[in-house]
Amino acid sequence: MTDVVFVSVEQTFDESMTIPELEERASWAWGTTVQAVKDADRVVAVKSQRPVAAWVLRGAYPTASYTYSKGNGDERPRIALDLGDPLPILPAYGEVPNMRRGIRVIDLDVQPLPHDRPLPSGL
C-alpha cells in the first residue's frame, strides 16, 4: 500500500498531447497543501474517470501566485508538483477517487517505488 496522488486533467487534456505537455498540466496549481501529498511517491493524471499518465512524484512546493479559498474564506497558496520519470499505468489506477479541487491522495494497493531514488524536494 502506498499513497498515490490523482489529479484531474479534464479541462486541459487533448489526445494529441505529448507526455511532456501533459506533465506541465498535471504539475501546477493544485488546491491542497504540501503536507497532504508528503507521503505519496507517484502522481496519476485522470481524464473522464480513467488514468491517462503517471509519474514519479519528486516533491511539492507552494506556488507564488496561485491561491485557493478554504470554506472559512481563508486563502492558501496552491501547490505545484515536481514530477519525475513517467511510469506505466497500472490496473490499480483504475480505482479513480472522487476529487475535490481536482486532486485527491489515496492509499492504494500498489508497491511503493524503490527508496533508492533521490529524496523528494520540497517535502
Image (cartoon, rainbow, N blue to C red):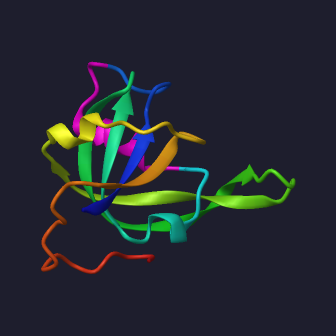
Q: Is residue 35 left or right of residue 117?
A: right
Vertical arrangement, residue 25 with respect to residue 2, above or below: above
Q: What residue sits 34% from the left and 39% below the top?
A: 45
Q: What residue sits 39% from the left and 21% below the top?
A: 48
Q: What residue sits 80% from the left and 50% below the top?
A: 71
The secondary structure that dominates the magenta segment is helix
Q: Position of residue 38 (x, y in %)?
A: 43, 71
Furthest-right residue in view? 73
Q: Is residue 97 left or right of residue 101?
A: left
What number of labels is visible? 0
Q: Position of residue 18 (x, y in %)?
A: 24, 32
Q: Nearer the viewer, residue 32 or 95?
A: 95
Figure quadrant of the N terminus: bottom left
Residue 26 part of the magenta-drawn span: yes
**Image quadrant in which you'd find residue 120:** bottom left
Q: Position of residue 8 (x, y in %)?
A: 45, 35
**Image quadrant in which you'd find residue 3:** bottom left
**Image quadrant in which you'd find residue 26:** top left
Figure quadrant of the C terminus: bottom left
Q: Nearer the viewer, residue 95 or 119?
A: 95
Magenta segment boundaries in residue numbering: 15-28
Vertical arrangement, residue 42 with respect to residue 44, above or below: below
Q: What residue sits 16% from the left and 75% below the top?
A: 117
Residue 21 part of the magenta-drawn span: yes
Q: Position of residue 83 (x, y in %)?
A: 32, 57
Vertical arrangement, residue 41 with respect to residue 30, above or below: below
